[in-house]
Image (tube, coloured by chain):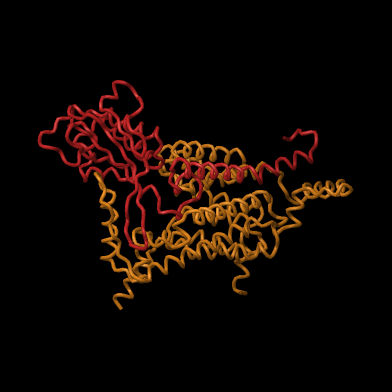
Amino acid sequence: MKDLPNPNFGHRLRAGIAVWLVPVLLLLVAGRQFYLAQTQLLTPWLGGGFGMFASIDRIDHRVVRAYAITEDSEIPLLLPRLDDSFRTQMKARMMPAVVTRTGYEQLWDLQVQEMKTRAMPTKQRLIDLLDQLGRLPWKNPDKLPIRLVEQPPDWDPTQIRQFRVEVWRLWFNPATKEVSAEILGSRQAPANFQAAGNQNGGNGEP
Amino acid sequence: MNFLSKPLDRLPRGPEGFEFIGIMTLVLLLFHANETWYLRVSITVLALIGLLFRSVLHKASYWWILSFILAAVYWSIWDLWIVNHKFAITYWCLAIACGLLAPRISSGEDQAATENEMASTSKTKEVPSAHRIRENGPCSLEDPYPYLAVCSRILIGLIFAIATLWKIVCPEFPNGNFFHFTLLTDHRFLDTAELVGGVSPEMSQQNLAAVNRMKQPGPPPSSVLLIDTPSIPRIALFIAVWTIFIEGSIGLFFLWPCQQKIAYWRDWLLITFIITTYPIATVHGFAWLIVIMAFAQCSPEFKLQRMMYLALFIGMPLMDIPIPYYLKTWLWMG
């Protein structure tokens, strides 16, 4: 820029960049966030769109529910959340007694995917979360990094036929003072789809 | 106000003022850029370099490196827990880097060159933008980086304007529903709800437990009921209307072209917003950043406003004192 033939032009160019580059970048990122919030159900609290403290729909008020489906029952899974501290999860017995390195990495990957899905429950993210569930060592329950909510007495992991994940968000009705939940997206996939690779799941979003 | 005249005269200005801005930014980064270990380590090392070797603060490359690290890390985890002010911190470091690349305005040769340039362009009525900044001021002749001040003003204006737009677009905000729910269930607002809304601690705990039940694994309950008082909806509506008014005003005033009267009042508007908001909504990283950016764009002629910004920066940790809690306890014990 020092050797520009027209110093006045160079002066103005640098001044223009100094003043406008960052505001334009801010507008682009905020515009992207607004688009994702309107079309991909991104929570307004994330993404750099300055939508914090504008909507009840924050990531803390969204829930991912996962189920292991057998032939005759649906067993809720206790997914550990990334925003819960490690110690809190240990205390809540959300982690196995012995966390192997592989188990820890699987837990981390699962938590990250859970949070990403909760933040923006697109079809691909729901599929990726099902993929993570399918990769867990179900045949070796002692090494599972997640827990079943209630373990049936005759529990046998090979009975699992499908997994289902759902993303819900809380909503508030001030007239009745009721807090209810509405579903944002769900996906279901066969339990053996890990062998077939990361293929498409079964049902789509409601 | 005579007792303030000496401290006001000693407020940093010119190149020293810019170093102040740089140091404040590094302090902000040390406390609030720590989401991952690699970010924390790299930012700490760079911040220490900047704090110990002040001349580094005037190097655009230093701020480019900081900006790049922040942008790369935050972009990789943008949809996890990166809240808005992390983006804004990155923008601010970028703005400093860009501001340092811009033509520097100083006395002496540069000023003479600018005046010569003006004389040569007077026939075509082209005024160099730097001089236009001075004329439309309040940017001072002593400010070596006036473009940073302009960029800072625009950034503040855009942030508040976009935030106001979101609050108007979300249907639950303008009618107070958002704050109705938040006052009853957000732990940061519970003390305020108990202090001014008449909500008891037992009611707050029941509301928190009710919301937690909705988040348990397995099929959710159809609904849960929250407990409130008749005052809460009125307080919520008041806060919502006030927030839209003040944030929208700040956005408008800061985006308005630089004029003396508007420049004078917009700083007081922003100071009022900071003082009334952040003791309750304890997002101190954002508050600190806004204070730094406001200080950067505030003309040295507005000494009292600049001192207020500095005082807010230094006093921000005091907002962690749970004043609503102690007020509530004192009133109830009395």
Q: In the displayed structure, would residue A195 be above or below residue B282?
A: above
Q: Position of residue B72 (x, y in %)?
A: 50, 36
Q: Position of residue A119 (x, y in %)?
A: 40, 42
Looking at this rendering, what residue extends furthest in the right direction?
A: B123
Q: Position of residue B265 (x, y in %)?
A: 63, 65
Chain corresponding to orange in the figure: B
Q: Name the residue nearer the viewer: B334 or A31.
A: A31
Looking at this rendering, what residue extends furthest in the left direction?
A: A153
Q: In the displayed structure, would residue B194 be above or below residue A37?
A: below
Q: Position of residue B183 (x, y in %)?
A: 37, 62
Q: Residue at x 86, y 46 (%)?
A: B121
- State the count of labels: 0
Left or right, B101 with respect to A138, comes to: right
Q: In the displayed structure, would residue B64 be above or below residue B299?
A: above
Q: Give the quadrant of residue B77.
A: top left
Q: Give the quadrant of residue A79.
A: top left
Quadrant the C terminus of chain A occupies? top left
Quadrant the N terminus of chain A occupies? top right
Looking at this rendering, what residue extends furthest in the bottom direction?
A: B334
Q: Name the residue nearer the viewer: B294 or B244.
A: B244
Q: Colour of chain A?
A: red
Q: Residue at x 13, y 37 (%)?
A: A152
Q: Give the quadrant of residue B39.
A: top left
Left or right, A77 with respect to B229, comes to: left
Q: Residue at x 10, y 36 (%)?
A: A153
Left or right, B153 with respect to B30, comes to: right
